[in-house]
Amino acid sequence: FFVILGVLEQCFRTRRKNMAGQKKTQVAEPTIKDFSIVYSVLSAEERDFLDKNHTVLKYRKNQIIYQEGEIPTGLLCLGAGKVKVFTEGIGGRDQIVRLAKAPDFIGYRALFAEGPHIASAVVIEPCVIFHISKDVIYQLLLRNNRLCMNIIKSFASELGFTRFRTVTLTQKHIRGRLAE
C-alpha cells in the first residue's frame, strides 16, 4: 500500500513540474471594440462616448448574470464565453430558453420592453460582458440609424431561430426532438 502511495506521489510531483515549465498561451481579452455589431457603425465621437461609458463585467462558471423578475439596467453584450438563459418550469425544473455565445446580446427583451426579465441567465463558460447603461444605449440609438439597423437585424435573426426551434420541437416525434 505504501509503495503505491509513493509511486502516486512521485507521479504528481513530476506532473506538477512539467506543468510549471509549460508556457500558458494568453488569449487577448475582448474589448468593446471587438463587439462589431455595435462598434463598427459608430462615428469617432460616438466610439469615444461608448469607450468612456460602458462597464466590463467578468463572470465565472455558474454565476448568475440576472434573475427572473429583476429590472434591467442596460444592454448586455456578450464579448466572450457562453450563457444559458432559462426559466423555471413545471415542478421547479429549469427550462432552457436560449444558449448564447459571444458575440451576442442577452437580456435585451426586458430592456427595450421596459419591464422585468422573464428569464434568468447563468454562465456556462467564463464570460466577459460589456454593460452599456440604458441611458447610453438610448442616446446612441437616437443618434445612429445604422446602429439601430444592426441591433434590429440581430434581434430579428434570433427571433427567426426561436420560431424555427419552436415549430421543430412541437411538430417532431420524441426521437426528433431529442436529437434537436
Image: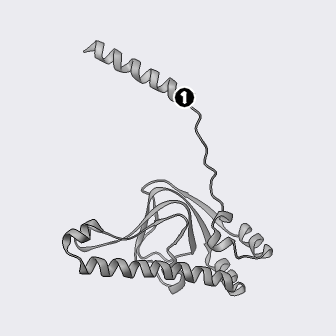
Image-quadrant location for residue 175 = bottom left
- Point out the image quarter for the C terminus: bottom left
Vertical order, 173 against 178 (above or below): below
Colour setting: one colour
Question: In the figure, 6 relative to 127: above or below?
Answer: above
Quadrant containing the N terminus is top left
Residue at image x 58%, y 38%? Answer: 24
x and y percentages locating residue 179 in the rendered image: 27, 66
Q: Residue at x 29, y 16 (%)?
A: 4
Residue topped by disc 1: 20
Q: Quick one: label 1, few (<14), some, or many (20+) residues within 10 Å?
A: few
Q: Position of residue 174 (x, y in %)?
A: 19, 71
Could you say which quadrant of the image residue 173 lies in?
bottom left
Please indicate whether residue 108 sits to the left or right of residue 36 in the image.
left
- Using residue 159 as the reference point, say whether residue 94 is left or right of it: left
Q: Residue furthest top?
A: 3
The spot of residue 79 in percent (x, y) is 58, 62
Q: In the image as oriented, which residue stretches furthest toward the right?
A: 45
Residue 97 placement: quadrant? bottom left
Q: How many numbered marks does the figure carry?
A: 1
The one of 180 and 64 positioned closer to us in this rendering: 180
The reply, left or right, for residue 140 in relation to residue 177 is right
The residue at 56%/83% (across/down) is 152
**Residue extending farthest left:** 174
> In the rendered view, would you say 117 is above or below 55?
below
Helix, strand or loop at disc 1? helix
**What kind of residue is marked 1?**
Ala
Residue 150 as seen in the image, left or right of residue 101: right
